Structure formats: structure tokens, C-alpha cells
Image: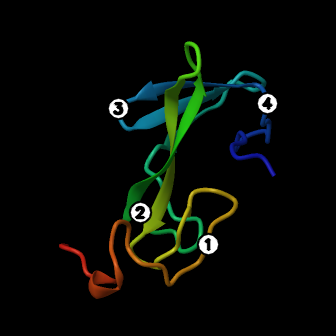
Amino acid sequence: MPAIACPACGEDDDLAGERVDERIVITCEACGATFGRDTTPTCGLCGSTDLEAIHTSTLREAGRGEQWAPSGVRIAWYCWDCTGRDVTSPDAVPGPNPPPGANDDVRGLRNR
């Protein structure tokens, strides 16, 4: 199933997007329809937008000589509502999971 498809004709390949503020405006080059896409991350398990980004690993590549150079980071999203982990990926893990950076003493606590 495609992540994005034109709501008018169903095209999922011939699409062009442009960022406008917090949204992406997509134009279907097959039929000419335009539609918006919100860039707010949403939990794939419960639909909540109360998410927190977790830095899970540093991507690295070969640098000079024997050194490795950082080339990026992998971000996973934690859902505060359903306590799911990596909720924006197809491999979402349902909770209960401890909050990012927390231990058992502060599980479930958060300043709201």
C-alpha cells in the first residue's frame, strides 16, 4: 500500500510536493489535483500526536584513515498516550514501554 496517493485519481507515483509552513502541498501530475499533507508525526498505533523523538543510534561512514565519521542519526518516536515505541514506522512496538530516558522510578511521569 502506498504511503501517499492522489485522492482524486489514486495515482501514487507521479506526485510533486512543496513545503508550505507546517504542511506539504502535493500536486498530482497525472490529473492536476492538489491536496495537503500534514507533517506532524502521528502514532501508527493509536493516532495520537503526543509523541517524543528518541535518538536511537548514530549512523556513521568511513572517514579518513581508520576513523569513522558521523553521517546522521536514527530517530524513533515514543507515544505518550499508548506508550508505543517506534510508532511512525511499520515496525511499531506497542507498550507499555518506559518513557525515553526514564527508569522504573519515573515510568509514566511527565510534565503536561
* Residue type, label 3: Asp
Q: Which SS class for mark 3? A: loop
Q: Which residue is mark 3?
A: 21
* Residue type, label 1: Val
Query: Viewed as shown, does residue 40 lie left or right of 109?
Result: right
Cα gap from disc 1 to disc 4, whole angstroms: 29 Å
Q: Which SS class for mark 4? A: loop
Q: Are marks 3 and 4 in contact (CB under 8 Å)?
A: no
* First of labels 1, 3 by sequence position: 3
Cα gap from disc 1 to disc 3, whole angstroms: 31 Å
* First of labels 3, 2 by sequence position: 3
Along the line of sight, the residue nearer the viewer: 90 or 20: 90
Q: Is residue 21 above or below residue 63?
A: below
Q: Which residue is mark 1?
A: 93
Q: Which residue is mark 2?
A: 49
Along the line of sight, the residue nearer the viewer: 14 or 43: 43
Q: Residues within 10 Å of mark 3 (few under 14, many from 20)?
A: few
Q: Residue at x 72, y 21 (%)?
A: 29
Q: Which residue is mark 4?
A: 13
Query: Viewed as shown, does residue 33 lie left or right of 38?
Result: right
Nearer the camera: disc 1 or disc 3: 1
| Residue 110 pos. (x, y %) | 24, 75
* Residue type, label 4: Asp
Cα gap from disc 4 to disc 2, whole angstroms: 27 Å
Name the quarter where the C terminus is drawn. Answer: bottom left
Q: Is residue 77 above or below residue 2?
A: below
Q: Residue at x 26, y 81 (%)?
A: 109
Q: Which SS class for mark 1? A: loop
Nearer the camera: disc 1 or disc 2: 1
Which label was assigned to residue 30? Answer: none
Q: Which SS class for mark 2? A: loop
Cα gap from disc 3 to disc 4, whole angstroms: 24 Å
